[in-house]
């Protein structure tokens, strides 16, 4: 099937409140434009250099999401235009985003990434780390970031019960943070979980945002043009 047909099929199976982020990393501009012409506007990238290149080349009404692990020294390149940063996995990174966003006079929506998988290769906070951060005077001084929800990646496994358990854990973290820290904050609403192999489980467990790449664009990787 075509990119457009793949998007249509995925969206047909998503509830209205769940946003599709098309993960376009390593894919060429023409494939993104095929998705764009079908109405897709939210795209996710995990490499800063590639994201900047695509932002410059592609239509300006695209909503760019940064979904990868980010080094603090690269934050400055994307804060002028990024719509949402999914993978905020340290207080140091959040403070850097705040500092760079202040220079651009922007407030950057961010998701707190939790380590929910049984894999050491995954990044993310623990719940105690997040609660300590949110209670801190240093966090209260941040003025150019907006905590909009949580993000997590399940273990890469065929065990659906384990995947479901990990997604349920992230939903529980979201609920606790909403109750304890953001009860009156309408912006704290996103649960970014679910990728091509497990997004239906994620939606069943409360996801509001799924990050889907290979099911839309295919498995093959491309090198971006220079």
Image (cartoon, rainbow, N blue to C red):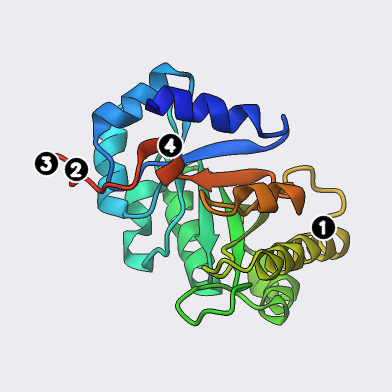
Residue drawn at x 49%, y 73% is 122
Marks 2 and 1 sit apart, C-alpha to C-alpha, by 39 Å
Disc 1 versus disc 3: nearer the observer: 3
Q: Around disc 3, counting alpha carbons within 10 Å, would you say few (fewer than 14), some (14 to 19), or many (20 or more)?
A: few
Q: Quadrant of the N terminus?
A: top left
From what the image shows, is residue 125 above or below residue 177?
Answer: below
Residue drawn at x 81%, y 56% is 182
Dot 1 or dot 4: first in sequence order is: 1
Q: How many numbered marks, from 0 up?
A: 4
Q: Quadrant of the C terminus?
A: top left
Q: Which residue is mark 3?
A: 226
Find residue 75 and report its image quarter.
Answer: bottom left
Task: Give 98 or 209, whichever is nearer the viewer.
Answer: 209
Disc 1 versus disc 4: nearer the observer: 4
Name the side, left or right, on which 54 lies relative to 143.
left
Q: Around disc 4, counting alpha carbons within 10 Å, would you say few (fewer than 14), some (14 to 19), or many (20 or more)?
A: many
Q: Which mark is residue 144?
A: none
Q: Around disc 1, counting alpha carbons within 10 Å, would you say few (fewer than 14), some (14 to 19), or many (20 or more)?
A: some
Counting from the top left corner in percent of width and height, residue 147 is at: 65, 54
Residue drawn at x 71%, y 64% is 170
Q: Which mark is residue 224?
A: 2
Disc 4 versus disc 2: nearer the observer: 4
Counting from the top left corner in percent of width and height, residue 128 is at: 72, 81
Find residue 31 and report its image quarter.
Answer: top left
From what the image shows, is residue 112 above or below residue 25?
Answer: below
Marks 1 and 4 sit apart, C-alpha to C-alpha, by 32 Å
Dot 4 or dot 3: first in sequence order is: 4
Dot 4 or dot 2: first in sequence order is: 4
Residue drawn at x 31%, y 53% is 48
Q: Which mark is residue 178?
A: 1
Q: Which residue is mark 4?
A: 216
């Amino acid at each position: 099937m075509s990119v457009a047909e793949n998007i249509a099929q995925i969206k047909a199976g998503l509830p209205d409140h769940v946003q599709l982020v098309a993960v376009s990393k390593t894919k060429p501009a023409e494939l993104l434009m095929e998705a764009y012409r079908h109405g897709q506007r939210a795209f996710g990238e995990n490499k800063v250099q590639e994201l900047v290149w695509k932002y410059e080349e592609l239509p300006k009404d695209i909503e760019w999401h940064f979904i990868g692990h980010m080094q603090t020294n690269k934050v400055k390149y994307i804060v002028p235009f990024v719509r949402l940063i999914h993978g905020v996995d340290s207080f140091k990174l959040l403070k850097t985003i705040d500092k760079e966003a202040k220079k651009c006079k922007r407030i950057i929506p961010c998701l707190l990434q939790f380590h929910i998988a049984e894999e050491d290769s995954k990044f993310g906070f623990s719940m105690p780390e997040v609660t300590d951060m949110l209670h801190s005077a240093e966090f209260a001084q941040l003025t150019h970031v907006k905590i909009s929800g949580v993000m997590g990646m399940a273990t890469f496994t065929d065990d659906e019960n384990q995947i479901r358990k990990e997604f349920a854990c992230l939903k529980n973290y979201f609920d606790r943070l909403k109750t304890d820290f953001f009860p009156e904050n309408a912006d704290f609403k996103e649960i970014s979980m679910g990728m091509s192999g497990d997004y239906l489980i994620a939606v069943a467990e409360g996801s509001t945002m799924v990050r889907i790449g290979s099911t839309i664009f295919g498995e093959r990787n491309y090198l971006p043009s220079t």
